[in-house]
Image (cartoon, grey):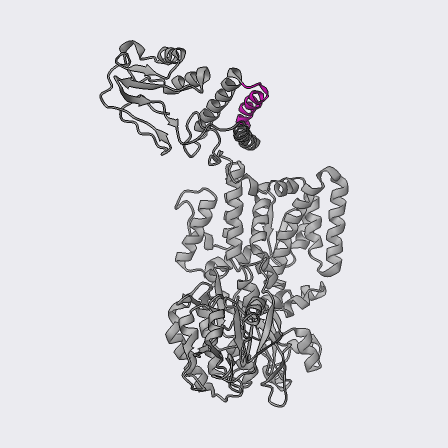
Amino acid sequence: MKFYFYEPQICGDFGENTVYAPPDKIDVLKFHYEFSSWPQDDMQWVGYCFMGTDQLKQAFEAVTPALTGIEFGPVEVTGDDQEFERVWRQGRPDSALGKWHWFKITGQPGVHDFGQAYRSMDLVVSERVIEVLKNFTVINPARKIQEWTGEIARK
Amino acid sequence: MAEIKSSDQGDQPSRHQVETPALNSPEAQQVRNAKGELVESIKAANPDRSDGSATPKNRAGLYSQALIEAQDRSIELFDGDKVVAARVMDVAKPAPTAKETVEQQSKTIEELSEIAKHNPVFQPILGLRQHAEKLPPGEEKDKFIQLAKEQATDTKALFSQAGSQSEDQESCGSHIYETPLKGYASYPDQEIEGVRRLTPEDLRKLAKAFEVAGPAGEASIKEISDEILRRTGEASRDTLLAGIKAVCTVLEYDRDLVFNPAEARKKAAAAGEALGVLFVVGVQFTAGGIGYADRVRQSGDYSLPLKNISEGLNRWYERQSPADQMAIVAELGAGFGLASGAVAVNKLRKKGALIEFLKEGLDALPRNPEAERRAIQAVSKLFGRAEPIADTGVVVAAKATDVVKDAHDKGLGDHVMGMVKYFEYGKKKPISAEQAAAKAGVTKSELRQMTEEQLEARGLESIQKSYDRMFFGKYPQLKNAGVVVHHALPQKLLEKHPGLFKAKEVNSIEYLRGIPVDARKDGEWVHHIITARWEKFLPDGKNVSKQQILNELKAIDKEYGRFYVPPR
């Protein structure tokens, strides 16, 4: 099976309701994502956390045999009161951000369908995941999806 | 329908038309599949019949007569055995069913009804059509239908309608009967009528009510509105409310310019439109400084005092580049229907001149709804673009100080405080003055008087202006132009690496970039690409130095600076 680096989109940052684990407040216990611009891709990322739309979650869950290395959890999603409200929202007054889920990566790179080394921003996914992603929005996949050849940290 | 003319071509692929250039005279041709009376009627309708011409001059008359007499008949003309001309027949298309015919006719009546609503000239034609509908099927019904069609066509031509239409063509859904009064739907007639019905005393009372802020002011405005509505009666309630709203929109905007600029910015376009409405109605304005309202009351003058709009508008105009000033003037001139060059760009720089120009321009308008609508739109657009307040912290502070005593006495001091932003150490987002005062354990008044060092000692920092006001103060032409104000130094630096940069630096003009919202590279929004790059450069737990950050900033500017507005 082939594996790939996949860099989702990042359109925001941790929101103020994010709860970090002590003592160094890096690992996240409660995830709040605050958009600063409008999302284009179905999967987003910030720090060491990933999240995706409800449709993408359902698509991943529908794969058989089941995809490994991922669990789903709740994420609070808001838009910030700065550029998001000032610019991005203005063109979409009736649009909603939609429902999102925390995509908790529990697998190891190159072993499970979803893999992430501890405190690494690199998400490594199998070709089975890429097959699902082909049916969803990934803007500029040439930059975001690259073949993984076994290294842990990508430059 | 085919022309009995050698050079004509049919324009519908489903119709069949055969001609020969060698056509001589009708007598040389043999008629087939035509009833005799039709041929006779065509011949009789041909004014050129005497010279044997095969091309009747009064084509319209020929067809209408032929149609009236025998609409469903056809004719083919032969030279010997060869078909040389034929009435165009839609051979591929079956004759419409009765249901289709009724539906088509209903559609035409519907269209005529809509047109007649806006143009009374079409009403008799609609009446004729409706009369035809009531007739039983037959020649007389067809005759009236045809007559209505012809009159509609001729009337349309009189109003220079766009689009082509043949005489016997039923509604095809593509005909838009344009009248000179297009754009009726967006003409604020209710607002204009509502303002017209307000008396000078009404205006004076509303202006007075706006001198008081907060719940007391709002209660006063409501009381005055209720009083006006009681006096004018329930029948004109909506109209009066629309007029009161227009006046209040302008007064509120004038007040917000100083005390709540963010709110003023949001309402600028609506305020411009409301101001345009008031100008059109002829409401008098006076632009004065503080205390003017008192003088107005004493003198009995019922003008609406606008303390800030005029001065602020001119100040904004003066800051524009000469090229931008020309563009603004050209746009306003076009909106007011003035000839190019009719307005002197430099003369509008004179104090109060811009708002005077707006008044005079609207006074000089031809009194038709379309001209007034365009002018009101031009004013609205101008206000939407303008940021008619000072752009430097010093001037704002001075202006705020000028009015703060007056404002404080009237309970508006808090609005002044709202302009200053406070940051807590280690947080990227500003907090309110109330929150900052609570954190510092002082009153808001004491907070306002603290030095930077005193604030820092309490874990606080203040900036005089928000980042977006900073940016658009310098580049006002980019406001509302689809530009995202991007923090070149990520705001999250204040949280993840507190102390490396001050909030003042992160939010300073030096580190702000304008990126068009639709700027893309390989389909990806540039804003997102840069955000991703910073996120990877600053992973949680990594130590970085200020210089490393500035180096990365320089590299990003070098790679993406061409997308910025202005570019770097």
Residue nearest the observer in this picture, A133 or B66:
A133
Provide residue A32's location: percent of width, then percent of height.
Answer: 61, 75
Q: As drawn, which residue projects farthest toward the left? A: B22
Residue nearest the observer in this picture, B204 or B463:
B463
What's the magenta bit mostly, secondary-structure-wise?
helix
Provide residue B218's location: percent of width, then percent of height.
Answer: 73, 56
* Looking at the image, residue B307 lies above or below residue B181: below
Provide residue B5's location: percent of width, then percent of height.
Answer: 29, 22
Q: Which segment is the magenta one? A: B120-137
Tell me what residue is drawn at x 24 percent, y 19 percent.
B23
Residue nearest the observer in this picture, B226 or B177:
B177
> Left of B215 or right of it: where is B514?
left
* Looking at the image, residue B389 lies above or below residue A26: above
Report whether residue A77 is seen.
yes
B122 is within the stretch colored magenta: yes
* Looking at the image, residue B105 lies above or below residue B144: below
